[in-house]
Image: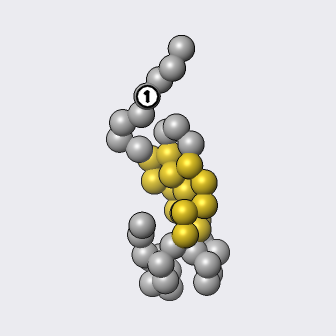
């Protein structure tokens, strides 16, 4: 989990997909997207 760069509050886990994780700040509603280094590809 990460802290908000704008207000310093702890960011909540908002959404997760195969390639990225999205966090949102409960105070100022800033969204931060964190790409994953590794992910599985299913065909």
Q: At 61% across and 78% down in the image, what residue appears?
A: 26
At 54% across and 63% down in the image, what residue appears?
13
- Image vertical order of residue 40 relative to residue 6, above or below: above
Q: In what element is the residue under mark 1?
A: loop
| Quadrant of the drawing holding the N terminus | bottom left
State the scheme by which the image is colored: secondary structure
Residue 35 x %, y %: 44, 47
Residue 25: horizontal and vertical position, in percent?
57, 74
* Number of dots carrying numbers: 1
* Residue furthest out toward the top: 43
Residue at 47% across, 23% down? 41
Few, some or many C-alpha atoms within 10 Å of disc 1 (few <14, some 14-19, many ≥20)? Answer: few
| Image: 40 above or below 3 | above
**Image point 43% across, 75% down: which residue?**
3
The residue under label 1 is 40
Residue 32, percent across and down?
52, 62
Q: Quadrant of residue 22?
A: bottom right
């Amino acid at each position: 989990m990460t802290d908000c760069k704008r207000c310093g509050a702890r960011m909540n886990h908002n959404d997760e997909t195969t390639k990225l994780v999205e966090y949102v700040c409960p105070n100022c509603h800033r969204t931060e997207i964190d790409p994953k280094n590794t992910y599985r590809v299913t065909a």
